[in-house]
Amino acid sequence: MRGIRLVLVGIGGLLLAWGAFVMLDSVRLTRLPGVALWIAAAIVLHDAILAPVVFALGIALRRVGRRATGTVIAIVQGGIVVGSIVSLVAVPTIVAKNFAPVNASVLPLNYGLNLGIFWLVLAVVTVGLSVGAFLRWRQPVAAFPDDSGR
């Protein structure tokens, strides 16, 4: 197991170095503070908002009279994480669209509306999967034949 961890850490380090090289090679030096600000904001949003919300939701779901299974909790938390990641990617385009780009074809879509529709679809899918998992959990388990060999 230790060897696998070392290989994975090595691969991660190489990928990090490659990403830094590509960023420094393709991004103008004057844009690097903006990239650093975006990365810092993503870390703060994750640690200050996303992680506590997912954690609190997990606790709240566990306190629902023990009616929520671990599968339901994982589905809801997964939905929140997916939605948050998509929002983290979409919000910069929504903000950039408000600055009225010179070329209207640069940001041609209504990203705010699309993000809202995405969250609505994600909520419907998450609720559907959660209800399905809950109903499956509540079904009685069929009796297994006696395996004692008699």
Image: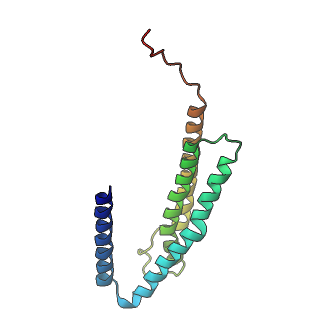
Q: Residue 24's x, y, as percent?
A: 32, 83
Q: 102 or 5: nearer the eye?
A: 5
Which image quadrant: the C terminus? top left
Asked if 130 appears above or below 18 in the picture, the reply is above
Q: Quadrant of residue 72?
A: top right
Q: How is the image coloured?
A: rainbow
Q: Is residue 30 left or right of residue 131?
A: left
Q: Residue 144's x, y, as percent?
A: 49, 18
Q: Residue at x 70, y 45 (%)?
A: 64
Q: Quadrant of residue 80?
A: bottom right
Task: Kindly give the residue lying farthest to the right in the view shown.
Answer: 65
Task: Kindly give the residue lying farthest to the bottom in the view shown.
Answer: 30
Q: Residue at x 55, y 24 (%)?
A: 141
Asked if 94 appears above or below 56 in the picture, the reply is below
Q: Residue at x 43, y 81 (%)?
A: 35
Q: Is residue 27 left or right of residue 72?
A: left
Q: 91 or 129: nearer the eye?
A: 129
